[in-house]
Amino acid sequence: MPAYDKRNVAKARNLRKAMTPWERKLWHGYLRNRPEHFRRQKPIGPYIVDFSCNDAKLIIELDGGGHYTAEQQTYDQERTAFLNAKDFTVLRFTNIDIDRNFEDVCAVIDRELEQRRKH
């Protein structure tokens, strides 16, 4: 299991209790019942990721409106680079994707998990 900053444990716990509507929809409508073990708001290194599956080395991030600033995009790129260096693949979806294309989001995750099972 990847190392994490213990100072993020309480924050992650609070984030799990206060999931966004889009996080709740993806968790309760899809990830929670997957045979792979997904975790919500999981600390990894200095970050807290929205959803992670350690066995598949897959992270799923949901991006709201705050992710469109230049500063946030730079932060997200650094974060993704860190996670990729830990051998994770990061899939990013927008909240709009969850609202309008939920089945397509689930299909993308399905395909990624299937590819990971083959390897």
Image (spheres, grey):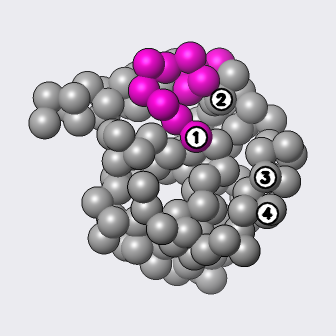
Q: What is the secondary structure assignment of the residue under circle 3?
A: helix
Viewer-closest of 69 and 5:
5
What type is the residue that disc 1 sits on?
Answer: Arg
Can I make out residue 6 in this image? yes
Image quadrant in which the N terminus is located: bottom left
**What is the CA distance from the residue labelled 1 to the residue labelled 4?**
15 Å
Q: What is the secondary structure assignment of the residue under circle 4?
A: helix
Residue position for label 2:
27
Q: What is the secondary structure assignment of the residue under circle 2?
A: helix
Residue position for label 4:
11
Q: Could you tell me residue 55's position as x and y percent?
A: 35, 40
| Magenta part of the chain | 29-39
Picture disc at residue 10 = none
Residue position for label 3:
13
What type is the residue that disc 3 sits on?
Answer: Arg
Viewer-closest of 9 and 28:
9
Residue 38, above or below 70: above
If you read the primary sequence from the N terminus, does the residue marked by circle 2 or circle 3 appear first? 3
Residue 32 among those drawn in magenta: yes
Residue at point 40%, 73% (across, down): 82
Residue at point 41%, 45% (across, down): 54
Picture disc at residue 39 = 1
If you read the primary sequence from the N terminus, does the residue marked by circle 2 or circle 4 appear first? 4
